[in-house]
Image (cartoon, rainbow, N blue to C red):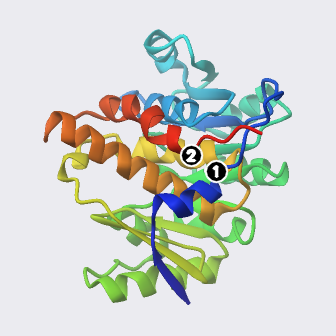
Amino acid sequence: MVTKNLTPSMVKKYIPSRKAKSRKGDNGTVLIVGGSYIYHGAPILSSIAALRCGTDLVYTCVPKINVSATRSVSPNLIVLPLVDQKLTRGAVNKLLGMLPHNLDSATIGMGLAIQEKNSLLHLVKSLLSQDVRLSLDASALIPEVLPLLANKNVVVTPHAGEFKRLFGESPSNIKKERIKTVENYAKKFGITVLLKGATDVISNGSTTYLYEKKTPGMTVGGTGDVLSGLVAGLLSKNRNTLESAAAATLINGLAGKATQKKLGLHMTSMDLLEELPYVMKQFDKIV
């Protein structure tokens, strides 16, 4: 098992070059599915993060009750209404009929209210059958989803509580044991696990990356939603789930450091989004 600390020089290799003559759609098409009556902001943060990391097209799918509020935040968002207030089988079927054919990746779960587990499983199964790379977060992290994911280009992004719900075991506070637990579940289920914490642990079961943030300002709500959007955005350009998750982790962390340096412990996740282009500019390559 290989364990490494994440560095910018590593991440530079994980972000593909952009062709000088590329056209709209060549640099990633992403779907974001999230939101609920209470948590309207989560999918917005993910969507803007995905756009900020250089994705050409982002489709933001939210319950119809949130559509007007979501559209009003930014003209950059392409908003698809979920026909029900929560994720239902009918809403999933309607959504699948609306999606573009060239979808590269998706992230599901941020603030999402799910009426029936089977609706989530149906969405995940349908997207995977179309070779869409997935990032799963928050309410999408349920144990029933695990059998669908093996070796299918999927990243899961739990915090400690979600990790326990997903895998049935709480990650240890002892660093060595925490790493081993993440590695074991990543290997067992054929997925990339990104365990969020003061030190993020990212593993596909054979290689593990660590990133110590040292930014207590990032405990503010929404930083995980930004991370989910970055994972999906990078996955749209790089099929390798470990590399995309690692790159997203470092970029999110560097943006957090820059924001905390500027604003102290008074940042919001919207502030984090503003820093993403400056952080990512160092990784730009045009061929």
Image location (x, y in percent) of residue 213: 29, 59
Q: Residue at x 63, y 57 (%)?
A: 14
Residue 138 in view: no
Tell me: 256 left or right of 54. left
Quadrant hosting residue 271: top left
Tell me: 201 left or right of 154. left
User: What amino acid is labelled 2 in the image?
Assistant: Phe
Image location (x, y in percent) of residue 233: 61, 42
Dot 2 corresponds to which residue? 283
Q: Earlier in the sequence, mark 1 or mark 2?
A: 1
Q: Considering only vertical position in the picture, is 126 above or below 179? A: above
Q: Residue at x 77, y 39 (%)?
A: 287
Q: Nearer the viewer, residue 204 or 67?
A: 204
- Category of crowding for the residue at label 2, using alpha-carbon neighbours closer than 10 angstroms: few (below 14), some (14–19), many (at least 20): some
Q: Nearer the viewer, residue 36 or 155?
A: 155
Tell me: 39 left or right of 95. left
Callouts 1 and 2 close, C-beta under 8 Å: yes
Quarter in which the N terminus is drawn: bottom right
Quadrant hosting residue 146: bottom right
- What is the spatial separation of the Cα atoms under label 1 and label 2, in whole angstroms? 7 Å
Q: Residue at x 20, y 41 (%)?
A: 261
Q: Nearer the viewer, residue 164 or 133?
A: 133
Dot 1 corresponds to which residue? 15
